Amino acid sequence: MQLTLEHVGKTVGPEVHLYPLSLSPVPGAVTVLLGATQAGKTSLMRIMAGLDGATSGRVSVDGRDVTRASVRERNVAMVYQQFVNYPSMTVAQNIASPLKLRGEKDIERRVRELAERLHIDPFLERLPAELSGGQQQRVALARALAKRAPLMLLDEPLVNLDYKLREELRDELTALFASGDSTVVYATTEPGEALLLGGHTAVMDAGELLQYGPTAEVFHAPQSIRVARAFSDPPMNLLPAEAVEGGVRLAGGDIWPVVLPVGAPRQLVLGLRAGALRPQAREGDVTVPGQVELAEIAGSDTFVHLRSPVGELVAQLTGVHNLNLGAPLTLHLDPRQVFLFDAAGPLLRPAARSANGGRG
């Protein structure tokens, strides 16, 4: 199914919820809507579903104009942040409801297949209120999958689950979406979730569509500082700099041997992802001395806030590092892993891709 949005915008009174945008999710694949809260993701999904009308523009499905078509006239499945299930129905009855509406045969077998795929088959005779939050969301997902809709919309479906459940369900969803049975649009605030789901990503901010393309391309070549901010967790380090002979001069007078593109302006902003900073030195590295302001261990990584001559930096170090506040710490980076932005925002040169994949 080919969903196409052409110059679609949404205003409510004096407030702009969506500036006019055009987007065509890839049929049978996953498109991630990535952006902070109030970026416009939910407004866009509601227009896709037919729950809300667009103020301007056109929505079409396989070339047919559905701009004014209601949600009942569209074959769409939607999963929300909250666990939306029929409270008086058992798990089995919840999953079976769209199958019965379509008059399908062998409903019991289909319900059990979906329940097994989502690991909720032991709970088929229970009511949703008797399940945990993660199990309730699995029921909602199973019901959406049972609908076999050509368009599936998921609005931050894992946001209310704890970390372990999010990880578990995210992996399962990635496998479920790989079948290509539906065009999937998935909204999230988490860059890591977009990278794990793959497919294509549309980066949104304050009601604007900033960039759309294959997820890896958008991550490695953000077109602007706004995109880089939205697609970096921890936030990308952004350092004002000046183009000089031999590279760039940063605050404190340090000169880094960063290769400048032809015609680069004098005033620049350097972008540096937290994972590009390392405690180990390699040939050709730039050295960044500093003091530890904060160190947090999260899983198998250590996040360090460093005060350095070039500015405040956040580093994501692999492994567990026991660092004392105020202690000196020297980090290193490959200058090729620096993003170069015009001071006005546009990307001038992406960073070289690191050997450790998405972290650079």
Image (tube, grey):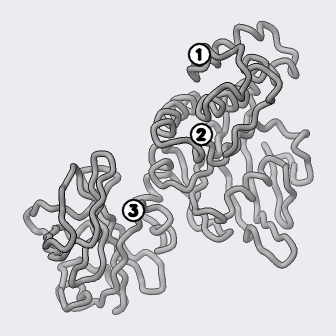
| Residue 7 % position (x, y) | 76, 65
Mark 2 vs mark 1, CA separation in Å: 23 Å
Q: Residue at x 75, y 59 (%)?
A: 43
Q: Residue at x 26, y 50 (%)?
A: 356
Nearer-N-terminus badge (3/1): 1
Residue type indicated by callout 2: Ala
Mark 3 vs mark 2, CA separation in Å: 27 Å
Quarter of the image where the C terminus is located: bottom left
Nearer-N-terminus badge (2/1): 2
Element under disc 2? loop
| Residue 306 % position (x, y) | 25, 73
Q: Residue furthest left?
A: 283
Q: Is 175 drawn above or below residue 235 in the view shown?
A: above
Residue pointed to by mark 2? 29
Q: Nearer the viewer, residue 229 or 304?
A: 304
Question: Horizontally, is 93 left or right of 306 in the view?
Answer: right
Nearer-N-terminus badge (3/2): 2
Element under disc 1? helix
Q: Which is in the foreground here, disc 2 or disc 1?
A: 1
Q: Is 158 drawn above or below residue 332 in the view shown?
A: above
Question: Horizontally, is 334 left or right of 359 in the view?
Answer: left
Residue pointed to by mark 1? 116
Residue pointed to by mark 3? 234
Please report contact status of discs 3 and 2: CB closer than 8 Å, yes or no.
no
Element under disc 3? loop
Q: Nearer the viewer, residue 265 or 45?
A: 45
Please report contact status of discs 3 and 1: CB closer than 8 Å, yes or no.
no
Residue 15: quadrant of the picture: bottom right
| Residue 91 % position (x, y) | 72, 21
